Amino acid sequence: MIPPSIQNVISERKICVLIPTYNNEKTLKRVIDGILEYTGSIIVVNDGSTDSTPRILSEYPDITVINLPENKGKGNGLKTGFRKAKNLGFDHAITIDSDGQHYPDDIPVFVNALLIEDEDILLIGNRNMSQEGIPKKSSFGNRFSNFWFWFETGIKLEDTQSGYRLYPLHKIPNKYFTPKFEFEIEIIVRTAWKHVPVKNIPVKVLYDPEERVSHFRPFKDFTRISILNTILVIIAIFYIAPRNFIRDFRKKSFKKFIKEDVLESDGSNRIKAISIALGIFVGLSPFWGFHSLIVISLAVILKLNKVLAFVASNISLPPFIPFIIAASLFLGSPFVQGNSNIFEHELDFELVKNNLLQYLIGSLILAGTVSTLVGVGSYFLLNKFSSENK
């Protein structure tokens, strides 16, 4: 599409471009000028800049500028910009960093993708993180973020940290809990939890060490991101996965639900074996009282066979508990001092309480060993039965 066509679509679909900025005087003007080739619907959130940013912005009287009195973080700047965009009547916002790493001429990529999808969707620019000049810490951080996003939502992306995005303003959450860099993780996870599609589209990236100013603080911000992911994982396991499971059950007929969401008859033998191994591991783990909730939640998140995982987790039924406790204490004894000789005490929860560390270590060893053996054995048995039935 040529720029005039892009301009028309941007206007018709009510798309604005949002630029959060903080002390990026070297690159800000170039970014704004590039965007103006496609649209004048620009919102700049000046997050308390102390350089020449205010002077640069004064050269653009026709764009919307929000000047915050002090720097409160990128997340806060984005939230402020989203509220303003909604108030101005926009339905979508393309966010672009002001440090010069993003190319404004990729705006048509987002617009075309929105037209193709023809639905409310959150698009994230997929940068080539393997190209020359990309800092290794950025590449590692992106892979780390991709893994946890997949675990929390079941969606596989190649780039979850790019700030070059298109947001459906009326589908993203209204309230948030994080104010800084971790905000961009929170918003995509919580938007995905609302069943809004989240996808990558390819974009170019430029890392110029002479121009680019990064405000990412490795230790502090990585710690905040890790804490956020821990909270999101807990929510995903104990709320989102069970909620989705129940909703799917209510939406479908009982027969269809059993076939598609429970039996998953078209699942591979590998998936079925992993499901059994997961059930065994959870059933032998020391999370008494939560085995069913944990195994179903993990099976939903990891897209495994829920019934096989649930049935396998019942290895911890009451008749087997004494044997599980004895095996766990026995396996954990070499790893602690003053361990208990299980043959000299009655096997009960009082023994577990008095030798808790020994039990915890042993139970994890037991769970890992037995689940691996059963999983591998199940895989070979399933393959054997499958070949015999052909």
Image (cartoon, rainbow, N blue to C red):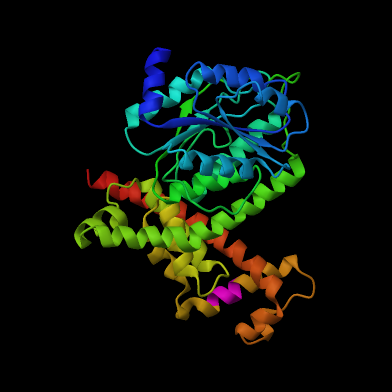
Which residue in the rendered view is the most extreme toward the top? 2
Which residue in the rendered view is the most extreme toward the front? 61
Horizontally, is 252 left or right of 360 in the view?
Answer: left
Residue 202 to residue 22: above or below = above
Horizontal and vertical percent position of residue 86: 46, 42
Nearer to us in this view, 234 or 216: 216
- In the rendered view of the protein, which quadrant contains the C terminus? top left
Horizontal and vertical percent position of residue 190: 49, 50
Queried whether the magenta region covers residue 98, the answer comes back as no
Nearer to us in this view, 12 or 376: 12
Horizontally, is 253 left or right of 52 in the view?
Answer: left
Horizontally, is 245 left or right of 140 in the view?
Answer: left
Q: Residue at x 69, y 71 (%)?
A: 358
Q: Residue at x 44, y 22 (%)?
A: 109
**Residue 12, image quadrant:** top left
Q: Residue at x 67, y 86 (%)?
A: 345
Regarding residue 375, the answer to whether it shows in the image is yes
Horizontal and vertical percent position of residue 5: 37, 16
Residue stretch in magenta: 323-327
Main secondary structure along the magenta-highlighted residues: helix
Regarding residue 24, the answer to whether it shows in the image is no
The number of numbered badges drawn on the structure is: 0
- In the rendered view of the protein, which quadrant contains the N terminus? top left
Nearer to us in this view, 89 or 382: 89
Horizontally, is 246 left or right of 93 in the view?
Answer: left
Q: Residue at x 27, y 51 (%)?
A: 265
Horizontal and vertical percent position of residue 315: 45, 70
